[in-house]
Image (cartoon, coloured by chain):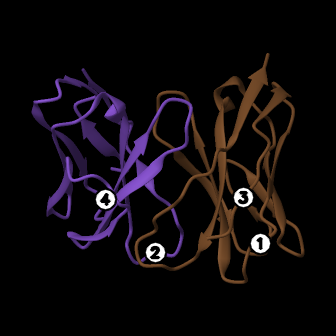
Chain colours: A brown, B purple
């Protein structure tokens, strides 16, 4: 699976959009980009995933560059409950069981 | 029911004890996982079960012994652990045939080895 690079930490003002970048310059054609988050003392939570098109769901939007070497997770109106570690993961879409390998992630702090 | 339930939430054990962590899901998922997470580190994959068969063992020491008695249950048997094995142990499940990469995680069992 391709390696990802994320900033170790970011701050965001409450109510503003949080834009979390991820670099995956060695991504291959059949690898998807997944985002998970882990709120303190809880298990990781799936947010969104995509292959090449931008994706949106009730939690967030995922913007993938045309060359697929980087992506941005957007939380449109950050709240204090969005304070968490956000993990960007790249893996092949189908490899039997969906085992995921987590990188170091970005610790997002939403400030009142 | 979209929950993965792990018990116990906290466990303290000595190095000579034998204990077990339990995980249960009722979402009909046929893949289940154990992850280990040390403080301020990302989760590390330990084991993957697919259709009740062990499909991945990420070179985990034999003092950790997984068991999948049926499609809803996953156990992790612990014996002769070391203090450095103290960590949060996370269980997860997914639809084995789904191409979404979406794993559902429990809240974890926090293990302390004295």
Q: Which residue is mark 1?
A: A26
Kindly indicate the quadrant of the structure image that contains residue A91: bottom right
Q: How far is mark 4 from mark 2, CA to CA? A: 13 Å
| Residue at disc 3, secondary structure | loop
Q: Residue at x 40, y 72 (%)?
A: A97
The secondary structure type at the circle numbered 2 is: loop
Q: Chain of mark 2?
A: B
Q: Chain of mark 3?
A: A
- Picture coordinates of residue B40, whole percent (x, y): 56, 31
Crowding around mark 3 (Cα neighbors within 10 Å: few <14, some 14 to 19, many 20+) is: many
Q: Could you give the CA–CA distance between mark 2 and mark 3, rounded to whole angstroms?
A: 23 Å
Q: Which mark is residue B98?
A: 2
Q: Residues within 10 Å of mark 4 (few under 14, many from 20)?
A: some
Q: Residue B94 versus residue A30: which sits nearer the camera?
A: A30
Residue highlighted by disc 4: B27
Q: How many marks?
A: 4
Residue B74 visible somewhere in the drawing: no
The mark that comes first in sequence, 4 or 2, is 4
The residue to which callout 3 is attached is: A4
4 and 2 marks on the same chain? yes
Query: Sequence order check: which comes first, mark 1 or mark 3?
Result: 3
Discs 2/1, front: 1
For this view, does A106 lie left or right of residue A98? right
């Amino acid at each position: 699976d391709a390696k990802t690079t994320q900033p170790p930490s970011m701050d965001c003002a409450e109510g503003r959009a949080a834009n979390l970048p991820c670099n995956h310059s060695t991504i291959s054609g059949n690898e998807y980009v997944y985002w998970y988050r882990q709120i303190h003392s809880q298990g990781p939570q799936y947010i969104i995933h995509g292959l090449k098109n931008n994706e949106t769901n009730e939690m967030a939007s995922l913007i993938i560059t045309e060359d697929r070497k980087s992506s941005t997770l957007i939380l449109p109106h950050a709240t204090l409950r969005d304070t968490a570690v956000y993990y960007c993961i790249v893996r092949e879409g189908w490899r039997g069981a969906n085992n995921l390998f987590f990188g170091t992630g970005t610790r997002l702090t939403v400030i009142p | 029911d979209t929950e993965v339930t792990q018990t116990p939430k906290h466990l303290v054990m000595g190095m000579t004890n034998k204990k077990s962590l339990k995980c249960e899901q009722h979402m009909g998922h046929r893949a289940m996982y154990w992850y280990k997470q040390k403080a301020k580190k990302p989760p590390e994959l330990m084991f993957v079960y697919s259709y009740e068969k062990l499909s991945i063992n990420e070179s985990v020491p034999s003092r950790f012994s997984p068991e999948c008695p049926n499609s809803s249950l996953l156990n992790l048997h612990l014996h002769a652990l070391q203090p450095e094995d103290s960590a949060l142990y996370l269980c997860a499940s997914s639809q084995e045939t789904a191409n979404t990469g979406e794993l559902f995680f429990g809240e974890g069992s926090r293990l302390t080895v004295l």
